[in-house]
Image (cartoon, rainbow, N blue to C red):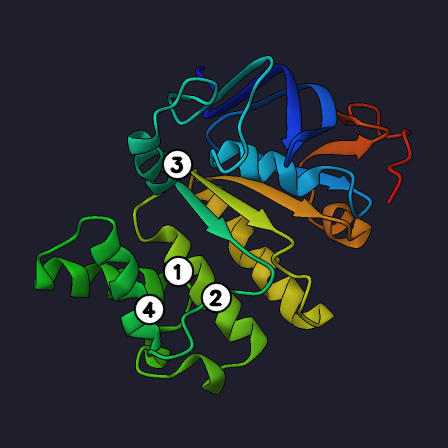
């Protein structure tokens, strides 16, 4: 099976500096992958490389069929439409409603038909249990509700994979569990999930493949007896 995300002997940059050497990683449809490690260990830099925000100068890297070493600037928006990205701080537009936030993304990615836009917004809000919040402003929502809207936004263009960068970092434990269960449900439906976290409790409670970043390396933990340093 062809990987959705593939790295082989890839050096991962943060700015001009290499933060991870020789990354080998393959993510396929239906995978749930955690990238764990201490702050500054390069976890988020991997996500930024997958979305072509960071350049890949050495090794192989492919995301959703796009070669990350040779991708053209004009193709980067198309790559990003194949990926849904969720952030720790939600990044909703605070001056417009939930519905308008989602419409903005759809129109920015080429959607024009009003009926199709309305239908897709309804579909994603229903999928995250937020259909009654369509007309709310972000400040009227709890942190967990805002993150559900952020997940709905990530689903708009039916991504092949969702990249979640510390999606529960600003949430209490109960709300974090709700968000993780939602991501697990999406994964069960076939969407690959790549999640950055430093919270050991999360990947112990919700099992998946684990890549541990430490000492300028990021390797898959294949032995359950290996301790993951956080």
Density class for disc 4 (Cα within 10 Å; few <14, some 14-19, many ≥20) is many
At 32% from the left and 45% from the top, the residue drawn is 158
Q: Earlier in the sequence, mark 3 or mark 2?
A: 2
Q: Is residue 135 left or right of residue 64?
A: left
How far apart are the two marked residues, 3 and 2, measured between alpha carbons? 18 Å
Residue located 8% across and 57% down the image: 113
Residue closest to the eye, 199 or 207: 199
Sequence-earlier tag: 4 or 2: 4
The residue singled out by tag 1 in the image is 152
Q: Which residue is mark 2?
A: 148
Q: Is residue 168 above or below residue 111?
A: below
- In this rendering, would 103 be left or right of 93? left
CB atoms at circles 2 and 1 under 8 Å apart?
Answer: yes
Residue 47: image quadrant is top right
Q: From what the image shows, is residue 96 above or below residue 222?
A: below
Of the pair 153 and 61, the residue shown nearer to us: 61
Residue matched to label 3: 160
**Circle nearer the N terminus (4, 3):** 4
């Amino acid at each position: 099976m062809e990987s959705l995300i593939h790295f082989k002997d890839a050096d991962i940059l943060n700015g001009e500096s290499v933060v991870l050497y020789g990354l080998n990683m393959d993510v396929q449809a239906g995978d749930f992958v955690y990238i764990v490690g201490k702050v500054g260990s390069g976890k988020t830099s991997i996500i930024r490389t997958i979305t072509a925000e960071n350049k890949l100068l050495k090794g192989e890297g492919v995301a959703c069929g796009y070669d990350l070493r040779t991708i053209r600037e004009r193709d980067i928006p198309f790559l990003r439409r194949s990926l849904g990205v969720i952030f720790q701080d939600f990044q909703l537009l605070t001056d417009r409603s939930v519905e308008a936030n989602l419409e903005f993304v759809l129109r920015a990615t080429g959607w024009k038909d009003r009926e199709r836009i309305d239908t897709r917004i309804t579909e994603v809000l229903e999928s995250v249990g937020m259909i009654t919040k369509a007309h709310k402003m972000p400040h009227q929502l709890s942190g967990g509700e805002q993150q559900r809207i952020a997940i709905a936004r990530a689903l708009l263009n039916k991504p092949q994979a969702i990249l979640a960068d510390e999606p529960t970092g600003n949430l209490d434990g109960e709300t974090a569990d709700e968000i993780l269960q939602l991501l697990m449900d999406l994964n069960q439906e076939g969407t690959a999930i790549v999640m950055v976290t430093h919270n050991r409790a999360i990947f112990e409670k919700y099992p998946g493949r684990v890549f541990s970043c430490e000492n300028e390396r990021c390797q898959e933990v294949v032995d359950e007896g290996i301790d993951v340093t956080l």
